């Protein structure tokens, strides 16, 4: 069972209390962008075996969105952080790099 700590309210919630929001840190393209950029934004998603950054919503708790870093192969959770951040916090990236030296970084 996947358990994530909501950084908004501090509750450790199991996945049945959460709603996945899929890939985090997408660069959005809208009106005025090229067809290729818009198509990539709409349809192309990473599907890595290893470190992945995801959006989650604490649906049956505080209701807020947050971001999580976890390993898709082992389901190890490296940490969660605010959805307001444009990139994972430096301390979280250092923690991931220490555990996964082959990780290419954010
Ligand atoms: Zn919460």
Image (cartoon, helix red, strand yellow):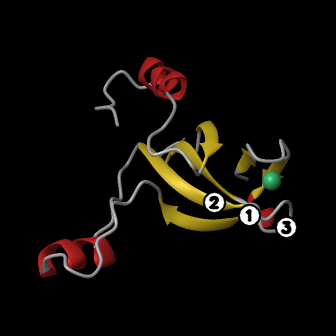
- In the picture of the structure, the residue carrying the numbered disc 1 is 18
- Label 2 and label 3: CA atoms lie apart by 12 Å
Front residue of 47/65: it is 65
Q: Are marks 1 and 3 in contact (CB under 8 Å)?
A: yes
Label 3 sits on a secondary structure element that is loop
Q: Quadrant of the C terminus?
A: top left
Q: Is mark 1 within 8 Å of ligand 1?
A: no
Q: Residue at x 59, y 51 (%)?
A: 83
Q: Residue at x 46, y 20 (%)?
A: 94
Q: Residue at x 38, y 60 (%)?
A: 26
> Can you give x and y, in whole percent of width and height, for residue 53 in the image?
47, 49
Local crowd size for mark 1, using a 10 Å CA cut-off: few (<14), some (14–19), many (≥20): many
**Residue 10 placement, left or right of 68:** right
- Label 1 and label 3: CA atoms lie apart by 7 Å
Q: Are marks 1 and 2 in contact (CB under 8 Å)?
A: yes
**Residue 90 placement, left or right of 80:** left
Q: Eyeballing the image, is 20 above or below 10? A: below
- In the picture of the structure, the residue carrying the numbered disc 2 is 56
- Which of marks 3 and 1 precedes in the sequence? 1
Label 1 sits on a secondary structure element that is loop
Q: Eyeballing the image, is 105 above or below 75? A: above
Farthest top residue?
Answer: 98
């Amino acid at each position: 069972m996947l358990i994530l700590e909501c950084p908004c309210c501090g509750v450790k919630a199991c996945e049945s209390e959460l709603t996945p929001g899929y890939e985090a840190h997408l660069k959005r393209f809208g009106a005025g962008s090229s067809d290729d950029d818009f198509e990539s934004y709409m349809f192309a998603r990473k599907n890595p075996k290893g470190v992945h950054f995801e959006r989650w919503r604490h649906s049956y708790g505080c209701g807020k969105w947050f971001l999580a870093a976890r390993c898709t192969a082992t389901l190890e959770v490296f940490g969660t952080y605010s959805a307001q951040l444009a990139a994972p916090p430096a301390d979280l990236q250092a923690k991931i790099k220490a555990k996964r030296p082959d990780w290419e970084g954010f």
